[in-house]
Image: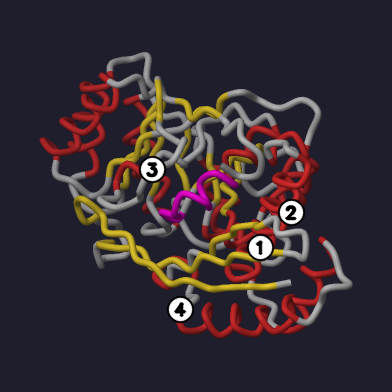
Amino acid sequence: MRATITRRSLTLRTPLATSYGQPLRSRELFELVIEGADGVPGRGEAAPLEAYDGVSSQRTLAALESYKEVLEGSDELEGGALLDACREANDLPQALAAVDLALWDRAGRRAGKPVAELLSDDVLAHVPVNATIGAEDRAGAAASAAAARSVGFRCVKLKVGVGDDAGRVAAVRAALGPEVALRLDANGAWTVDEAVRAIESLAASGLELVEEPVHGLAACREVRERVAVRIAIDETAAEPGALASGAADAVCLKLGRCGGISGLLAAATLVRTSGSEPYVASTFDGPLGIAAAVHAAAALRITTACGLATLEHFEDAGTHPLSVRDGQIAVPAGPGLM
């Protein structure tokens, strides 16, 4: 098997400010292409985001280089065995995701089917997605909300924990009207008491859920027990035991953190077993990562809006079949991921 690694960077049209402090201006990605003796290729993507998951590009590239040695010396292995061999070489989920995606893409191309149809016999044709508004001021957030509503989004996520939350949330709700779901994301900016006070004061605007109000399972569980609004975990989902803890009403799953499609499906099963609801989001992944997440969400039949409408934020994402129409992304119908 041949394997090649390509490093690329995507630039955001407008820097995205979050409660982390440093605005996100670009995304560095690694594309892995594998090709077997039959000449059928498979493409995957690694998209680490150090500010979010603590994984650097250098560490990811080193892992991918170790996988390349495994892949090119493993013509006898297929599928899961190849992934396991790469994991033994370097157990880094954000890099393993590239191998997993490439294997699924290649399997779909060989079978002449979209990846979603390899995952399940009963898949969604479209995956609902939310628009995302960063740490814009009151007027900017309202304008972004109005724009999202005008193109058919049925759910909008607003970053909070960045100042003037009451004014910004009220302005966004006014711009959205009562029919569009409003989701907040604090990225763990609050303490437990701060989160409870903020959520109680903002709840009058009608909130679908609040994502990652605090960091940590114990803290999230306490917030959930003290407020009426649904609570979701995101960064906290990386903690050991979090997926099956039932500490939140919903769990945001990320392709990179789960190690690819295979890991995401397993994670969603754990979440549902605990009585919580899974949904899928992007860490501003590239087209391959978004395509893979869409296939996984479709196979899982997730109807909660997923955070996958992010390619439109890039200047140079290239052509892809993943445009948002009326708040949904159509599942790619071609063989493989796209």
> In the image, is residue 102 above or below residue 269?
below
Q: Nearer the viewer, residue 321 or 232?
A: 321
Q: In the rendering, at what x and y percent does residue 84 appear?
A: 81, 71
Is residue 215 in the magenta section?
A: no
Q: In the rendering, at what x and y percent does residue 138 appear?
A: 14, 38
Question: Does label 3 or label 4 sit earlier along the sequence?
Answer: 4
Q: Label 1, label 2: how many angstroms apart (C-alpha)?
A: 7 Å
Q: Label 1, label 4: how many angstroms apart (C-alpha)?
A: 15 Å
Q: Amino acid at mark 2?
A: Ser
Question: Does label 1 or label 4 sit earlier along the sequence?
Answer: 4
Q: Nearer the viewer, residue 308 or 135?
A: 308
Tag 4 secondary structure:
loop
The residue that label 3 is drawn on is 319
- Residue at figure coordinates x 26%, y 55% from the top left: 12
The residue that label 1 is drawn on is 259
> In the image, is residue 259 above or below residue 142?
below
- Residue at figure coordinates x 33%, y 34% from the top left: 202
Tag 3 secondary structure:
loop
Crowd rating for badge 3 (residues with CA inside 10 Å; few <14, some 14–19, many 20+)? few
Q: Amino acid at mark 1?
A: Gly
Crowd rating for badge 1 (residues with CA inside 10 Å; few <14, some 14–19, many 20+)? many
The reply, left or right, for residue 23 in relation to residue 262 is: left
The residue that label 4 is drawn on is 56
Crowd rating for badge 4 (residues with CA inside 10 Å; few <14, some 14–19, many 20+)? some
Residue stretch rendered in magenta on the structure: 283-292
Q: Label 2, label 4: how many angstroms apart (C-alpha)?
A: 23 Å
Tag 1 secondary structure:
loop
Q: Is the Cβ of the residue at disc 3 closer than 8 Å to that at disc 4?
A: no
- Residue at figure coordinates x 32%, y 60% from the top left: 10
Question: Does label 3 or label 1 sit earlier along the sequence?
Answer: 1
Quadrant, the N terminus: bottom right
The residue that label 2 is drawn on is 262
